[in-house]
Image (tube, coloured by chain):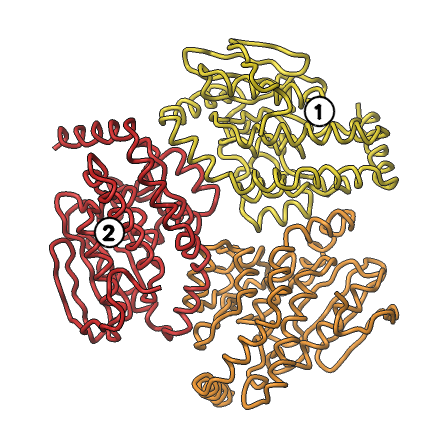
Chain colours: A yellow, B orange, C red
C-alpha cells in the first residue's frame, strides 16, 4: 500500500543531510550510514510534528540507495525520548486524535519494518513511546548509566500499551518478562534492562557513538538482500497484525483518550511534570 | 459468558473471610489483599470438592470490590498441592469425569483470567496440577528449600499435560524449556525452578509470607484498571483457546481416562502412594 | 499422508544395523538405541543421496519396535555436517531442484516429527543445514571445542533460511536471539552456542558419546506414549505449517535458486571452497 506520506510516482531526491524542526539527519555516503538525531528539547516528546518528521526522514533514507543503515539517537542530554507527547492527547478534537495516532502507527511501521539496519544508541532515559522506538530497531546499545532507565511504563500512568507495542516487546524479551514489566509499568535502570535483554549492550556514555558505528559496520558486512528478507520474515507477523487492525486501533485510542477520567489523569500528570521543572 | 458457578443476576454478598471444607480465605480490607489457603491434608489433592471451592472462592473475591489481590498458599506443611486428585479419575462414571474436568477448567479460567493480582507463595512441593496453580498466578515466590520441587511431571505418570497446561507453561518459561521439561516430566528442585524462570524468586521459608505481602503491595501500587487490561491483553490468546475448545478438551480427557491401560496405571500409582504412607 | 519414501502396506523388515553410501546405522536392541552416523567426507554435505538415505534410515528405525531413540553424529572428523550440498543447487534442472528440495523437507519432517528420542552429538562444526539437523533433535550435546561452530549462517552466503528453519530455530532459542543470529548469519563457537541455548550441553570431545548415551537413557526412562504425545503437542504447529505450504515452499526455492545472481554467487562460493582445500 502506498504511504500516506509520499504521493506515488514522485521519487524523493537523494540527500546527504537534512534537518527539520525536530529531527536532524546526516548521511555518510562513504559508509552508507545515516545518523538521525531527535532534537526536540526539553525531553524529545513524540509530538505529531516530530513523529511526522521522523517517518518522512526514515522514508527519505529508505529510498536513498546510498543509505544502508541508520543510527537513531538523541541530541538532548540525558533523555533519549520521553515518549508520546501528552499534550497531543489532551483537550483536542477527534480529528486531531486520529491524525496523531495515525502518525504514531506510521512511525512504527516505517521503523519496525525498515529494510535498513537500524541501531538505537540510547543515550538517556527512554520511557513508553521512547522505549518503543528503541525496541523497534535491530540492535540497542545503551549508555551504562544506572540513572538512565527504559521501559514501557504506560500502566504507571493508568493507560495500556497498545497491542503492537506489546508484540514488539514480546519479540525482544519474551512473553514472561513482557507480562510482568507491562503489568508493573516498570522503568528498568540500564543494568537491569541489559540483564532482561531489553537492550543488547551497555557501554560507557562517551563510547556510545563509537560502539554504535562498530555494530553498524558489523551488520552492514552482510549482503543487504538476504538480510532484508530475513528481517521481513522475522517481523512480518507483527507488522501485518497492526496493518490488519489499523483503523480499529485508531478507534480504540480515540475512545480511550476521550474518556473524562483519562483526560483528568493526563491533565494531572502534565501539571505534575510542569511543577517538576 | 456467565459462569456456571453463579446464577446470573444474584450478586454475591461482600465477605471478610470464609472457610469451606478445603479452602480458607481471609480478606484484609485495609490492604485489599486476601489470603487463600488450601487445606486438604495430607497433600492438598485437587479434588472436585477443592476445585469447586477454589473457583467459588476466587469468584467471591473477584466480585468483592474491597479485594484487589489474592495470595495463594498451602495450610499443609511441606506441600503446596500434589495436583489433580487421582481418585477422581479412577473407576468413576462418565458423568463424574465430565464434572471433574469441567471443574479443573473452571478453576484455571478463573485463576489465569483473574483481574485481581495473584501471587503464589509456594511453601512446599508442587507437582502437576499444583504447578499449574502456581504458573497461573502473576508472580511466584517459592521457599528456598531444595527438597521442595515443582513441575508439570505428567509424562512421568504416563499421561499428557493438556494443551492449556502447556500454553500456560510456555508463557512463563518459553518454548524450549517447556518442551524439554514436559517431555521428561521433570520435577525441578526450587533452585533449578528459579534458574529456569519457573518461579520468580526464592526466599527462606520463614520469610515467605512477608515477601508475598511485599510483592503484592508493589503490584497493588499500580492503578487497577490499566493493569487489568494489560493482563487480559497478555493472557487472552491462551484463555480464548481453551474457551473455544472446552467441550473437545473434556471429551479428550474422558476418552483418555476411560482407557483400561490408563485406569490400570493410575490404580498402580495410587497403590504405590498408599504404601508410601 | 503416506510417505513418498515407502509404498503403503509394505512393512519394513526389522533391522539391527545397516549401512548405505552416506549413512551408517547401528541399533543396540538391548537398549533400544540406534547410532546414526553421517559419513560423507570431506564435510558431510547434505546431498540428495545423503538426505534420501537419512530419511529412509529414520523411517526404518521409526517402524522398528525395537528402536526407541537415535543418536545422530558424524563419522567425519571435525565436522558434524556442512549443510545443504551446494552442487545440488548449481546448474541443475527444475526437476532436480524440485527433487532435492522435497528431500530436504522430507528429512526435516521425519526428524523434527520423529516419535523416537533424538539426541544430536555434535562432534564438529555445523553450519546451515547441519545446524538444522541438530536443532531438530530433542537434545543437543556439543564437543567443548571453541574451534567448532554452529549456526544458521545462510545470510552470510546471500541466501535466506526457509521459514521452517526459522520456526525450528525460534522454538529453541526464542524470537530475539533467532532474529539477530539469522540476520547476521552468525556461526556461534561452541561456548557461545551453549550460552545462547542453541546447544544444551558442552562436554569434552572424548566424552561426547558417553554423555549422549547417558542423556538418551534419561529420556528413555519415561514411558514412550506420553512422551511422544507431548512432543507432538509441542511441535505440531511448526510441522503443520510446512505441510500446509510444502509445494509453495518448493516453488519459492526453485524461483530463488534459478536466479542468475544466485547461481553466480553459489558458483563463486564453490570455487572459494575448492581453493581452500
Relative height, residue B190 to residue C181 (above, below): below
Q: Which mark is residue C204?
A: 2
Label 1 element class: strand
Q: Is residue C62 visible?
A: yes
Residue A170: x %, y % from top left: 56, 44
Residue matched to label 1: A45
Q: Is residue C202 visible?
A: no
> Chain for mark 1?
A
> Chain for mark 2?
C
Instruction: Determine if marks 2 and 1 fall on one subunit.
Output: no
The residue located at (44%, 69%) in the rendering is: B185
Residue C106: x %, y % from top left: 30, 55
The residue located at (79%, 23%) in the rendering is: A277
Viewed as shown, does residue B124 lie left or right of A32? right
Foreground residue, B252 or A179?
B252
Residue A256: x %, y % from top left: 79, 41
Of the two numbered discs 2 and 1 in the rendering, the one whose residue sits closer to the viewer: 1
Q: Quadrant of the N terminus of chain B?
A: bottom right
Label 2 element class: loop
Foreground residue, A197 or A241?
A241
Foreground residue, B243 or A133?
B243
Callouts 2 and 1 close, C-beta under 8 Å = no
Determine crowd level at label 2: few under 14, some 14-19, many 20+ residues with C-alpha closer than 10 A: few
Relative height, residue B44 to residue B149 (above, below): below
Amino acid at each position: 500500500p502506498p504511504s500516506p506520506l509520499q504521493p506515488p510516482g514522485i521519487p524523493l531526491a537523494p540527500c546527504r543531510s537534512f534537518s527539520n524542526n525536530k529531527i536532524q539527519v546526516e548521511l555518510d555516503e562513504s559508509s552508507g550510514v545515516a545518523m538521525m538525531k531527535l532534537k526536540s528539547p526539553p525531553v524529545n516528546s513524540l509530538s505529531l510534528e516530530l513523529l511526522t518528521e521522523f517517518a518522512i526522514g526514515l522514508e527519505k533514507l529508505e529510498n536513498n540507495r546510498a543509505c544502508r543503515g541508520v543510527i537513531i539517537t538523541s541530541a538532548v542530554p540525558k533523555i533519549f525520548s520521553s515518549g508520546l507527547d501528552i499534550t497531543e492527547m489532551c483537550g483536542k478534537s477527534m480529528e486531531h486524535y486520529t491524525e496523531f495516532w495515525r502518525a504514531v502507527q506510521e512511525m512504527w511501521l516505517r521503523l519496525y519494518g525498515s529494510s535498513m539496519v537500524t541501531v538505537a544508541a540510547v543515550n538517556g532515559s527512554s520511557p513508553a513511546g521512547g522505549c518503543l522506538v528503541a525496541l523497534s530497531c535491530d540492535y540497542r546499545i545503551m549508555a551504562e548509566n544506572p540513572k538512565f532507565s527504559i521501559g514501557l511504563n504506560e500502566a504507571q500512568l493508568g493507560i495500556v500499551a497498545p497491542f503492537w507495542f506489546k508484540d514488539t516487546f514480546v519479540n525482544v524479551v519474551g512473553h514472561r518478562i513482557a507480562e510482568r514489566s507491562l503489568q508493573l509499568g516498570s522503568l528498568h535502570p540500564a543494568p537491569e534492562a541489559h540483564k532482561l535483554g531489553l537492550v543488547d549492550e551497555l557501554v560507557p556514555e562517551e563510547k556510545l557513538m563509537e560502539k554504535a558505528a562498530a555494530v553498524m559496520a558489523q551488520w552492514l558486512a552482510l549482503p543487504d538482500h538476504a538480510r532484508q528478507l530475513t528481517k521481513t520474515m522475522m517481523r512480518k507477523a507483527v507488522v501485518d497484525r497492526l496493518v490488519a487492525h489499523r483503523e480499529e486501533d485508531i478507534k480504540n485510542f480515540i475512545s480511550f483518550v476521550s474518556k473524562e477520567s483519562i483526560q483528568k489523569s493526563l491533565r494531572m500528570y502534565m501539571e505534575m511534570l510542569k511543577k517538576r521543572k
